[in-house]
Image: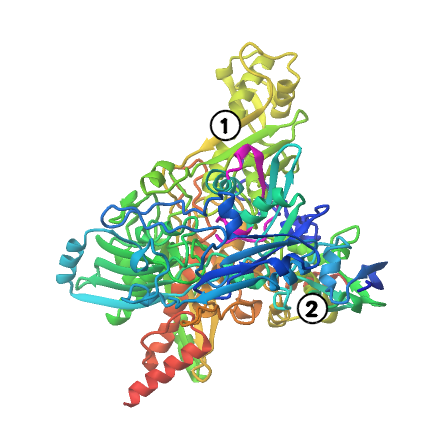
Amino acid sequence: MAKLHVSTTINGEPQEFLCDAEQSMLDVLRGPLGLTGAKEGCGTGDCGACTITLNGRIVCSCLMLAAEAEGQEIGTIEGMAGEELHPLQQKFLESAALQCGICTPGVLMAAKALLEKNPDPTEHEVRFWLAGNLCRCTGYDKIIRAVMDTAADMRAAR
Amino acid sequence: MTSATGIGARVVRTEDKRFLTGTGRYVDDLPLARATYAYFLRSPHAHAKIKSIDISAAEKSPGVVNIFTGKDLVDAKVGGLICGWVVKDKNGEPHKSPPHPVMAVDTVRYVGDTVAMVVANSYDEAKDAAEAIRVDYEVLPAIVDLAKAFDKGAPQVHAEAPGNLIYDWEIGVKADVDAAFAKAAHVTKMDIVNNRLIPNAMEPRAAAAEYDKGTGNYTLWSTSQNPHVLRLILSAFVLGIPEHKLRVIAPDVGGGFGSKIFCYADETMVCWAASRVGRPIKWTAERTESFQTDCHGRDHVTHAELALDKDGKFLALKVETIANMGAYLSTFSTAVPTYLYATLLAGQYTTPLIYANVKAAVTHTAPVDAYRGAGRPEATFVIETIVSKAAAELKMDPAELRRKNFIPAEAFPYQTPVALQYDSGNYPPIIDEAMRIADYAGFEARRAEAKSRGKLRGIGFSSYIEACGLAPSQVIGQLGGGVGQWESAQIKFNPTGNVQVITGSHSHGQGHETTFAQLVHDRLGVPMDQIEVVHGDTSTTTFGMGTYGSRSLAVGGSAIMKATDKIIAKGKKIAAHLMEADVADVVFENGTFKVAGTDKAVPLAQAVFAAYVPHNYPLAEIEPGMDENAFYDPANFVYPAGTQICEVEIDPETGIVEVIAHTAVDDFGNIINPMIVEGQVHGGIVQGVGQALFEGAVYDKNTGQLLSGSFMDYTMPRADNFPSFKLGYKVTPCPHNPLGVKGCGEAGAIAAPAAVMNAVHNALAPIGVKHVEMPATPLNVWQSIQGAQRAAAE
């Protein structure tokens, strides 16, 4: 079958690609587009390692068809830092809120979406928001702390 | 030297920037030109004869490059996968050693056993073609239930292991233990199951390989915790590719927890097939394949008895365990329930007599091998639950009973009755600190308050000991291990003064790139940003034994310290020459060589430059260059110890167990980077609480199907399941390694299950619940409560 031609925006830049109808967004990101930051931890939407944003909302890119990106805005971990790290990345760095790094891109994308929606979350809210992101290394403790601390810093900076 | 970035400092992890920006490079991320993709056809049956395999239709499937079956490996004389640890049974006979073909030839023995490899231009094409392979199976009865593995008439897994028995092993003198029991004032008995776990590193196992026709060299990228060991096994036992023609690279690896130590069929096949296919091959496990084929952990059925005198002193401990090996013996499987389990049964206590009998069984399930803690969590669970049970039976405070039996600080080094000699420790201050942090004194008030809300509160202790820092090579050899257990290090300066620290350890989340750099920075004064830690590639690193058993710092870090000694020794000679001084008068302080009592000084960087540009240099006495190797073989294991206290609240209406607070106080010896150590403890606790409350591999007992084969069916711990943890430390430095360190990677997972389950039992005791098995899921707890209520009503 002929490939589908998709025009989309990825991390603010226009992007065109060809894909098969059944191909997932994750596959296209990691394959032809060479954006390997999003990881496949399960392929069934249970672990959150492939989390990206679609028009600002977090989605599991393993469950999204690549063709659905047509005309939409995609955000990936590669677009999170500008010249400087995003405050969440900086806080994760300073507090060692990661270990092996596989879940980290997904956790950061989800946490960023949380803070955009709710700049002053309770610990309970952060824990529930990130319950869709499995991490086998950190025990979540430092992740939760880093998100809470970043939220406080970002509020103070406003 | 101690500085803001030296030993003991909370140094920001060097490796993290790449992980935070999505630029880490894991096996599946590698771009390989002209790559093909592999898919493995796996057995859908737990036990079946393969009558025939027909690949003719599959070969015509679009995109197929090649298909291999077990017969191809037989024809090519490929060896089987090995078990590298010979355990001798009661009679001195080596364990039964059934063959472990890389791909099944005539029989499949668990759901997931490898049957065929399809290589195609794309992964989807390989998978489609695999569907067209016709395998004619004759399905046979399977033995899945461990407790019934030795029953007469049970289905047999291997002809080479009659009765499904791999070994019947013992430690201790049974008659002496029996005599002590005869004199006991009180005996506590317990039957427990240590539930089977699936490691689930978040990065699935993956392999990629390419073969260079021009040189005959193979390169294998693997998600390995120990690339040199993997290469050794593949070269010497399985594929016969000479070691120098096989390069194994373990790049960034996304967690291991033991499951990536072993040599697996799939990576073996990817490597072997690369030369036959003539193009690179990539393979990454789907999550369900990880569930089915990663080596599982734990899985013991145990009966234990503890004898106490009238004052509560432990007289003797007797343990009978059946350990599941799964369908085949994985790389280090045989050692886990013997030398890593029964030798730990003294715990933190002076129990003078211990007898343990371990029978290892094969069953039609995935192979079982080391998983975070490996044997030591199982031992801790036995000791710490039976001690708490004894305290409850004797109506004693569980902390008091523990204290009464702790090995006193002045007794170290302490020889246990089960072979180990604990080098150092001081246990009473640890439990005191844990009780202070956990506000043990205030618990009864909290219990009463919870009761007023209709909730059941409980508190549980777990005081663990661990033998890690694997290990003295000669001890390992005497116990049947097939490898040395030293570690290597190389410190290689460049002429401009920056340095590569090359280690045989492998980091897959532990932060070695930071911790090891801190050691060198602290010792040699080289700035942190001038140090690069190199690991994971057999072509660029000295042969090393890899990372497992909390060994990397205690053994690998000690090797680095030895190498720094050699750098300093050589630097002194160079500096003495440059300063026209006697080498005996040269001292090294804060990165500079000095002559005591003078203002003469040569910074290390100057000595390094002189070593590479040896114009003014004692060439007659020493070689140019500044590049030193060291191997370190430890004198003993290291013995981290600690106490965890867990406080839970149970809703008797739903059976939901909530962890309200979890405290861990550990003695890891000296700590290099507290921030990294905290993370190790947190992660370990969550895996341990996961075992206690959520996780369990479930096979259908008749068909052997893995029922918990996805994240929808196997409950992984998630962020909303936990409170923030409370940690504390006490330090008794390890007396036999240069850093005084003990290892921290497994402690959390070792201690937590007993702490949680003791809390659950403590919470449920007032309503008459005697025993809950792990995992204490809402259903399990609710049913236990209903059972107790029925029993009370009768």
Tell me the chain of label 2. A
Q: Quadrant of the C terminus of chain A?
A: bottom right
Q: Estimate how packed mark 1 is, as few (under 14), some (14 to 19) or many (20 or more) residues with alpha carbons within 10 Å.
A: some
Q: Residue B402 is drawn in which quadrant?
A: bottom left
Percent x, y of residue B356: 26, 56
Residue farthest toward the bottom in the current orientation of the protein: B793
Find residue B565 and name its label: 1
Percent x, y of residue B407: 28, 51
Report the amino acid beneath label 2: Leu
Highlighted magenta segment, given as a residue range: B240-266
- Which element type, helix, strand or loop, lies under badge 1? helix
Report the amino acid beneath label 1: Asp
- Which element type, helix, strand or loop, lies under badge 2? loop
- Report whether residue B670 is seen: yes
Asked whether, in this view, residue B637 is left or right of residue B610, the answer is: left
Asked whether, in this view, residue B562 is left or right of residue B590, the answer is: left
Q: Are marks 1 and 2 in contact (CB under 8 Å)?
A: no
Q: Residue B664 is drawn in which quadrant?
A: bottom left
Label 2 belongs to which residue? A63
